[in-house]
Amino acid sequence: MTRADVVPLPQLLGSVRKVLSGRSGLITQPWHPKVNEAIARLIADTDGALFNSVAQLGLVTGIEGEYLSRLVHADTGFTLRDWRRGLRVRAVVQRLIMSTEHVGQIVYDIGYRSHSGMDHEFRRTFGFDPSAFRRLYKSDSRR
């Protein structure tokens, strides 16, 4: 990571507040009823235990998985995969801020298959790995 890649702390914390408040593209709107149901089920299943595929989510909502996927994208502008990622990153952020749990335990609890998978998503969202994020957040909150 170069110096130019480092996100300034105020910008990072603004992104965190946005993710935690749900304003990072996860905005509630009057969507198709099946889209509302699918998103609600994803929110309730942030650890990924119930819905590991679009087909599974489609079965529960009573609509074919690929059609549901197209409806979600058309209504929200995000794919089901984007929703899942966003919700998982949000869950990780909350746990990093609210607990002292080891990052590896959080990875397992949230439902990631590997630590590197979560690191990749986290870096993509914030520009830091989860451990660095926790250190930065904790140091800023002490000011």
Image (cartoon, helix red, strand yellow):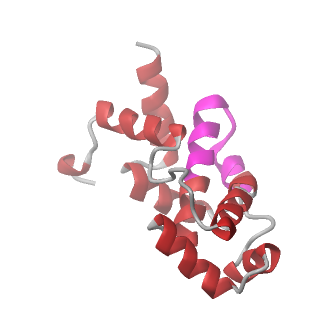
Q: Is residue 141 left or right of residue 58?
A: left
Q: Is residue 126 above or below residue 49?
A: above
Locate residue 106, reporting x and y percent: 68, 48
- Which residue is drawn at the image coordinates 26% and 45% (left, top)? 6
Q: Residue furthest left?
A: 4
Quadrant, the C terminus: top left
Q: Would you say residue 87 sits in the magenta stretch?
A: no
- Which residue is drawn at the image coordinates 47% and 32% (left, top)? 135
Q: Is residue 100 above or below residue 127?
A: above
- Which residue is drawn at the image coordinates 70% and 78% (left, top)? 53
Q: Nearer the viewer, residue 138 or 50?
A: 50
Locate residue 13, reporting x and y percent: 39, 33
Write the start and end of the magenta stretch as one range: 89-108
Q: Residue furthest top?
A: 143
Could you tell me how many numbered marks the image carries?
A: 0
Q: For residue 107, what is the image quadrant?
A: bottom right
Q: Nearer the viewer, residue 102 or 11?
A: 11
Instruction: Please indicate, yes or no, whether residue 122 appears anywhere in the rendered image.
Output: yes
